[in-house]
């Protein structure tokens, strides 16, 4: 692992190539998994606001699951978004092509909501765990979700660290990202962490 300020980062975060390709994965990260996306406590009020605004346009099953206008639940590992029937996030909408998309992100793109989506969703497939005041950042490779993104990243020559630039700046700030980017380039140049 390498350190950038208050974060310890797995070497594969610097090495792996990745770029989302929703045409191939169909938005699997919003659908597949045993729990909802992790949520930070300070995100709960804005997620509740998003639910109240977007619920009428969401799936009937999602509205049945979120009967109390609270789309966040205290799960096994902390706060997480509710899911329908252990599958889709309650904020999932489907395109005519069958792609699962985030209703919050869609509203943000359209200028109808002033927040992009939970930071854990923005950062995926990175997962962050805070231990004793340090953030541990790992690449969470789940073949059924991440394979299309890895294939696209390799084909287009896009590193995960570059693909997630905006999300990492949102989480840690531009100065942190600049130091992180320099460390990733050094690690790749020197072949550090390659087994």
Image: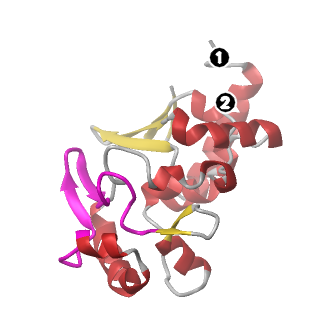
Left or right: 151 with respect to 96?
right
Q: Main secondary structure of the magenta part?
A: loop
CA gap, disc 1 and disc 2: 8 Å
Task: Give the percent coordinates (x, y) of residue 135.
Answer: 39, 41
Is 81 situated left or right of 3 in this image? left
Residue 15 image offset from top left, x and y in percent: 67, 30
Q: Nearer the viewer, residue 22 or 175?
A: 22
The quadrant holding residue 109 is bottom right
Name the residue located 64 percent from the left edge and 64 percent from the top edge. Answer: 97
- At x 27% / y 69%, what residue is drawn? 71
Residue 78 lies in the magenta-colored region = yes
Graded by Cα atoms within 10 Å as few (under 14), some (14 to 19) or many (20 or more), the crowding at tag 1 reads few
The answer to whether residue 79 shows anywhere in this view is yes
Q: Are marks 1 and 2 in contact (CB under 8 Å)?
A: yes
On the image, the x and y values in percent for residue 192 come to: 65, 19
At horizontal 27% and vertical 63% (from top left) the residue drawn is 41
Q: Earlier in the sequence, mark 1 or mark 2?
A: 2
- The residue located at (73%, 20%) in the rendering is 190
Spot the residue most to the right. Answer: 156
Label at residue 84 = none
| Secondary element at tag 1 | loop
Residue 1 part of the magenta segment = no
Residue 147 picture quarter: top right
What SS does tag 2 mark?
helix
Start and end of the magenta stretch? 65-92
| Outermost residue toward the top in this view | 195
Residue bearing the label numbered 2:
15
The quarter of the rendered structure image containing the C terminus is: top right
Residue nearer the viewer, 118 or 81: 81
The residue that disc 1 covers is 194
The answer to which of 114 and 8 lies nearer the viewer is 114
């Amino acid at each position: 692992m390498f350190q950038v300020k208050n974060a310890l980062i797995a070497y594969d975060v610097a090495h792996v190539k990745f770029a989302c390709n929703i045409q191939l994965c169909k938005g699997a990260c919003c659908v597949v998994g045993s729990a909802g996306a992790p949520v930070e406590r300070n995100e709960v009020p804005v997620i509740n606001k998003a639910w109240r605004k977007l619920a009428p346009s969401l799936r009937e099953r999602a509205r049945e699951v979120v009967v109390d206008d609270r789309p966040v639940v205290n799960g096994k590992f902390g706060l997480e978004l509710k899911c329908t029937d252990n599958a889709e996030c309650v904020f999932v909408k489907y395109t005519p092509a069958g792609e699962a998309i985030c209703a919050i992100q869609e509203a943000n793109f359209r200028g109808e909501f002033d927040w992009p989506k939970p930071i854990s969703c923005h950062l995926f497939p990175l997962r962050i765990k805070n231990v004793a005041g340090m953030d541990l950042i790992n690449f969470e490779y789940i073949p059924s979700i991440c394979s299309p993104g890895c294939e696209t990243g390799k084909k287009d020559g896009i590193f995960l660290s570059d693909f997630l630039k905006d999300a990492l700046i949102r989480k840690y700030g531009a100065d942190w990202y600049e130091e992180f980017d320099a460390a990733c380039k050094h690690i790749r140049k020197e072949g550090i962490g390659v087994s």
